[in-house]
Amino acid sequence: MTIFIVVILVLNWNSLRILQIITIIGYLLIIHLAFDAYLRPDKWLGLHRTFLGLVIHSATWSGAISLALYGLSLFTPWNFFFLAAPHFLIDARKCSLQQRFGQNAYLVDQFLHVVTILITLR
């Protein structure tokens, strides 16, 4: 802990801003993983392979990320829709990703979701 405090004191303002950005991205990635893998109402309802399930999952995931952005004072109304639409499309194409990338499809899927989050922060 002491080392962390010393590092922060040594860093200038711009570096502190970089640490804040990294922290924000870290929070968003944790929320992303939680809601993309574990906290999925579509799976709880047995709808995870249906259109309605994909809509529910995309809306839940986008809502969670949007709430985090709101809490960080980074939310704008278009964030929810910019997050939901690509998430829906990426997950809808997951089957073709699996055919094209095999076992790496999960990594491609997660990479695309993370890119969507990073673009939203821009």
Image (cartoon, rainbow, N blue to C red):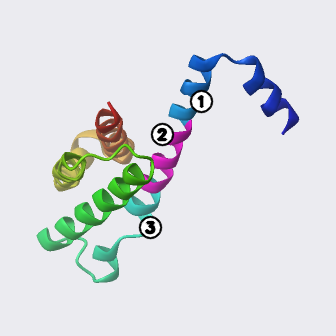
Which residue, as the protein is rendered here, is positioned at the far left?
51
Mark-to-mark CA distance, 1 and 3: 28 Å
Within 10 Å of disc 1 (Cα), the crowding (few <14, some 14-19, many 20+) is some
Q: Which residue is mark 2?
A: 25
In this view of the protein, which residue sits in the foreground, 45 or 83? Answer: 83
Callout 1 secondary element: helix
Tell me what residue is drawn at x 33 percent, y 35 percent: 115
Residue depicted at x 18% and y 46%: 78
| 24 with respect to 56 (left or right) | right
Label 3 element class: helix
Q: Quadrant of the N terminus?
A: top right
Q: Quadrant of residue 41?
A: bottom left
Q: Which residue is mark 3?
A: 38
Q: Quadrant of residue 43?
A: bottom left
Residue, x 21% and y 50% (percent of image)? 77
Amino acid type indicated by mark 3 = Tyr
Is disc 2 surrounded by few (<14), some (14 to 19) or many (20+) residues within 10 Å?
some
* Chain part drawn in magenta: 23-32
Locate residue 85 relative to residue 31 in the image: left or right: left
Question: Which of the labelled discs sits on residue 19, or is there none?
Answer: 1
Nearest the viewer among 104 and 22 is 22
Q: Nearer the viewer, mark 2 or mark 1?
A: 1
Magenta span contains residue 67: no
Q: Indicate the quadrant where residue 113 lies.
A: top left
Q: Tell me, yes or no, whether the highlighted magenta stretch contains residue 24.
A: yes
Q: Amino acid at mark 1?
A: Leu
**Could you tell me which quadrant the C terminus lies in?**
top left
